[in-house]
Amino acid sequence: MLLLALVAALEIAGKVANAQAAASEASTPTWPVALPRERHGHRVEPLDGGLLSFGGFGDARAADRESRQTWWLAPGATQWTRRADLRREMAFSGSAVIAGVVYAIGADVERYDAKADVWVEVTPPGKLPRSHFGAAALEGKLFVLGGYGAAESGLWVVDVKDGAVHAEPPPPSFTKDDHFHLVHALRGELHVIGGLDGEKFEVQREHWVRSASGWRALPAPPDGLWAKFSAHTVVGETLYVFGENGGWRFDAAEGAWRELAKSGSTLAMPATAVWDGKLWILGGMDIARDDARILEAFDLRAQRWLELAPRAK
C-alpha cells in the first residue's frame, strides 16, 4: 500500500510539474524575436503591425559599422528581413512616428516609404546635430534637443511637411554641449528629463515641460537619468525609464515618479518597443558581456520583468 501511495504521489507531482511547465511555456511571449545581430545606438519603431529597426552600430569590422542597415520584423514573423538602407549613416540618433510614418533623425531627417521600400530625405545635413541628442514628435513636428555636430547646440524644430528647421528656446538650465536628454511628448506637452552636463559630465536630475506659456520645472526624477544608459518609452500617459541605477515611471496625469524593478542588465543605447501589454528592449550593449543579442520584456500589467529564453548569440 505504501508503494502504491508513493507511485500515485509521484504521478501527481509529475502531472503538476508538466502542467506548470505547459502554463509557463504558454505564457512565454513568442513575438517579437531578438534582432538578427548584436546592435546598439539603433532605433526601433512600430510600422504596419510590425517593427522597423534602423541605424546603430553592428559589426565593427564593417566600413560603416552597419550604421545604415534597416531590418523589418513582420507581425508574427520569427525572422527579421533586410529592407532598404538609410541614405546616410546614423547611430546614437533619434526617431519618431507621425501619422503612421517613420522618421529617422540624424545629421539629416529621412522618411521611410514602406510601400516603395525607400528612405526619402526630408531635411538635408547641416542643420541638425548628428548624434547624442534627444528627439520627440509633437503636433506634427519633430523636436531635437542638444547633441553633437551642430554649430549651435539647442532646441531645433523640424516641420516634416517642408523640411524647414527653426530654433526655439531650450529649457532654462540648458547650456551648449549638454546632451543625451530624455525627450518625450506627454499629454500634448514636451518633456525634457535629465541629460548629461556637457561641461561637468555629470548626469542631471532636472525635469522640464514646455507648454504654450513656456518652460516650467516639475519635480525632479528620483535619480539622475540620461539616454546613453536608459531604455525609455511612453505608454499612454506614462513614461517608463529603466536606467543604470533603477527603474522608474512618470505618470503625467499625477505628475509623480514611482519606482519600478530594475532590469537585470545595464545596457548602453538599447531600443524599445511596446507590444501586447509589454515593454520590449531590443538590442543594446551589455556592459557585462558583448556577445549577446539582447531581448528583454517588462510586463506593463503585472509591472514585472518576464523570464525569457537565454539570449541568442
Image (cartoon, grey):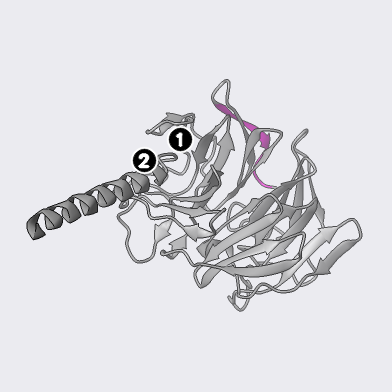
Proximity of marks 1 and 2: CB atoms separated by less than 8 Å: yes
The image shows residue 169 at horizontal and vertical percentages of: 82, 60
> At x 64% / y 69%, what residue is drawn?
258
Indicate whether residue 120 is drawn in magenta: yes
Indicate whether residue 92 is drawn in magenta: no
In the image, which residues are magenta?
118-126
Instruction: Tell which of 229 and 127 is nearer to you.
Output: 229
Instruction: Tell which of 286 and 265 is nearer to you.
Output: 265
Quarter of the image with the N terminus in it: bottom left
Relative vertical location of residue 156 with respect to residue 206 in this rendering, above or below: above
Residue 36 is tagged as 2
The image shows residue 38 at horizontal and vertical percentages of: 37, 49
> For this view, does 70 lie left or right of residue 132?
left
Look at label 2 and name its amino acid: Pro
Mark 1 crowd level (few <14, some 14–19, many ≥20, 10 Å Cα): many
Relative vertical location of residue 248 with respect to residue 158 in this rendering, above or below: below
- The residue at the far front in this view is 1
